[in-house]
Image (cartoon, rainbow, N blue to C red):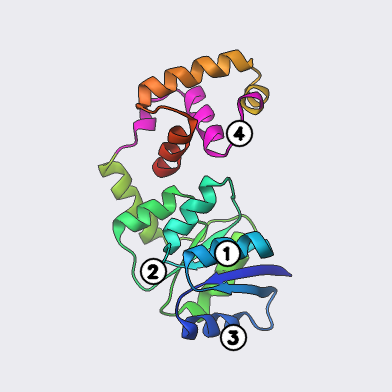
Amino acid sequence: MSTILLADDHAFIRAGVEAVLAGTAYNLVATATNGREALEAIARHDPDICVFDVAMPDGNGIETLQALRQMGDNRPVVLLSAMISDSGLADAVAAGVNGIVSKEGAEEVLVEVLDLVAAGNIAIPAEMLARAEAVRCANPSPLDALTPREKTIVGLIARGARNREIAEALGITEGTVKVYLHALYIKLGTQNRTELAVLALGAR
């Protein structure tokens, strides 16, 4: 049985999701009412999948997703949304959201979406992916100009890899990694690996 954390500031929605999950392969182990509580509950309960409302106080669903990814946490995240802007949608996809469910009719599709993301699949409606891609094309990423090797290094940095781990993954020396990083800082206008990681996560 997979464990679920639900973060939503509306008690009615929390009760509805709990009712939908009753008798399924998913056990709701914790709930939260905002992004801050969600991160605390994740640390405490270590759920298999997180379900975040897009519109929450003290860290909305997209910001909470971004915070998770910045910590190197890649567990599946599903967003619940009554409405999501094009920019918010692009940010969510860039941060690596695994599924998006409209609150209208969520009771009919939530378990199916959880099944998909639990199996390692992406469960985002094609129309939403198209909207996110349109935003990305209108605002090209500075990472697009990097070489494949540089993009790989940036991706590893975004996942929290240290120089030694990057060197081992790519079969190069730590000194070579430092040379690459110096060049990347100049190319991308960043000062350190933290800024590089934030840029990479925002450009996904």
- N-terminal-most mark, 4 or 2: 2
Which quarter of the rendered picture does the N terminus lie within?
Answer: bottom right
Residue 166: quarter of image? top right
Find the distance from the CA under tag 2 to the CA under tag 3: 21 Å
Question: Helix or strand or loop: what does disc 4 sit on?
Answer: loop
Residue 176 visible: yes
- N-terminal-most mark, 3 or 4: 3
Q: Residue at x 45, y 28 (%)?
A: 192
Q: Residues within 10 Å of mark 3 (few under 14, many from 20)?
A: few
- Residue closest to the eye, 124 or 47: 47
Within the magenta stretch, is there residue 111? no
| Residue receiving disc 1 | 50
Q: Where residue 204 appears, x then y in whole percent?
A: 43, 43
Question: Helix or strand or loop: what does disc 1 sit on?
Answer: strand
- Labels 2, 3: front one: 2
| Residue receiving disc 4 | 161
Q: Residue at x 43, y 52 (%)?
A: 93
Numbered mark located on residue 55 in the image:
2
